[in-house]
Image (cartoon, rainbow, N blue to C red):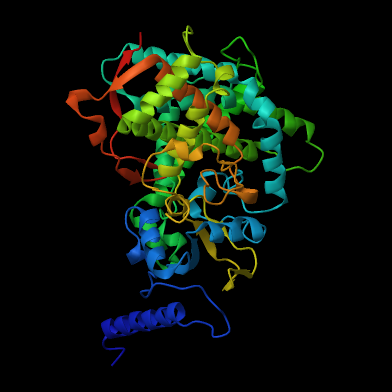
Amino acid sequence: MLEQNPQYLYLLTIFSVIVIFYRWFTVKTASKNLPPSPPKLPIIGNFHQIGPDPHISLGALAQKYGSLMLLKFGSVPVLVASSADAAQEIMKTNDLAFADRPTTSITDRLFYNSRDVGFARYSEYWRQVKSICVVQLLSTKRVQSFHNVREEEVDLLIQNIEYSKIVNLRDLFSELTNNVVCRVALGRKYGNDKGNSYKHLLKEMTNLLGYFRSIGDFIPLLYWIDRLKGLKGKVGKVADEVDAFLEGVLRDHRQGSTAPDDAYANKDFVSILLEIQKENLDTGLSIDDDCIKAVILDMFFAGTETSSTTLEWTIAALLKNPGVLLKLQTEIREIGRGKSKITEGDLAKMHYLKAVMKESMRLYFTAPLLMPREARQDVKVMGYDIRSGTQVLINAWAIARDPALWNNPEEFRPERFFNNPIDYKGLHYEYLPFGAGRRVCPGILFAVAVNELAVANLVHKFDFELPHGERMEDMDMTGVTGLTVRRKSPLLVIATPHV
């Protein structure tokens, strides 16, 4: 009968596969004490319970199943931590056990087999490259040495606003952060056709990156869907174009045709990495061209997308809360009295500004699930058994809105950070805008320096209102989840120079 009816054979095979997967997904090992789990479906696991905003969906599940949950995304076990205690056990107590990054097909292709700092597996190579970034590129001394670049680009931002009636702050913040990173990382800004191409490539890469982007990474049997959607081809095309652009950057530097476009001629990141490559040519360190290109891509994504999004949320939150904006204006304009602009030397005195920036990053997380980790070994977390290879998501968004940790967490109240030791450097697990532990973001100082200077000068220089008579209190603060969580619509304002 089977030979005469191949369709019956096909259906029987499909049914058998489903039964096998169902048993695989639902049967637990009796000897293991696993975290609570929501019910799963065959093949897809818990994917059906994840909406367009995964951090919100996972936060709702945590309310029902607890602050430490074990889910299945396809065939991949995923541990989700939604409390400060759970985050501390993962990122401090068991930091080494969870120091790995999961391998994904997209990051491997775009970041030269994940040879950057952000996506690289935990290894001696990663330790060496991270050390170079922290010491040579992102140290306090190095970040301070580029203060002129930040100040000049913020000046240009102010000029662009002064000559516009209705200002699209999203576009201008993106231009600001791109220009700063270009000058610091590549030695100069890229304009005209080459600049447009570079910005287009960054946008394309941003659209491709995301935890749930590739179905094949979670359900290998369905890898063909990625090809059917054209995802594989698009990733390959963008990766080739990015590589061609970066090859040109390296060639320009080696030929000496890239000269700094400012009088204060600091060495840019590419020049520093090329020097390290030359010095360590015979030492066995793996600082080859692919490594340099991967690290530079890290600088762009850490220094542009997240920073510009943070700036947009911060200004939107100030407009939404006029009382907070007035307090900030009072502080900044008093310190900047008689000055045409705020310099980085003024920022240390602006305590309310620092509280505003902290509160903005608490309430409006740009990366609410942080970057995923992976268990390198079997380990216990809060008494539960976690297997090697389990991926880990820290729902920093849910932790930062936990009413057990924060009074009135949905309110924008910078005062909560007055006389409060909580900081963003990864030592307080109720507040993790940059992560914590070994995989903490190494670019904290760089990001904070750009953001504080830009906000201070905007508030010092302009009074704001919304176009078309819209009331500030009625602003829509809906976010849309992509690589980062952005405002649903670009922030448009009318900026009037303050007299």
Give left or right: position of 270 versus 51: right
Give left or right: position of 228 versus 103: left
- 241 up-or-down from 386: above or below: above
The percent coordinates of residue 206 (x first, y second) are 42, 40
The percent coordinates of residue 307 (x first, y second) are 47, 33
| Residue at the (61%, 47%) spot, across then down | 427
Q: Closest to the observer: 49 or 196? A: 49
Please give the count of numbered marks on the rendered protein: 0
Q: Residue furthest right?
A: 282
- 182 up-or-down from 234: above or below: above
Q: Is residue 121 visible?
A: yes
Q: Residue furthest left?
A: 468
The percent coordinates of residue 55 (x first, y second) are 40, 54
- 35 up-or-down from 247: above or below: below
Q: Is residue 188 visible?
A: no
| Quadrant, the C terminus | top left
- 452 up-or-down from 203: above or below: above
| Residue at the (78%, 36%) spot, across then down | 281
Q: Residue furthest bottom?
A: 1
| Quadrant, the N terminus | bottom left
| Residue at the (36%, 55%) spot, across then down | 56
Q: Closest to the observer: 278 or 147? A: 147
Q: Closest to the observer: 303 or 195? A: 303
| Residue at the (48%, 28%) spot, across then down | 353
- Based on the displayed image, in which of its 4 quarters is residue 378 positioned? bottom right
The percent coordinates of residue 386 (x first, y second) are 58, 70
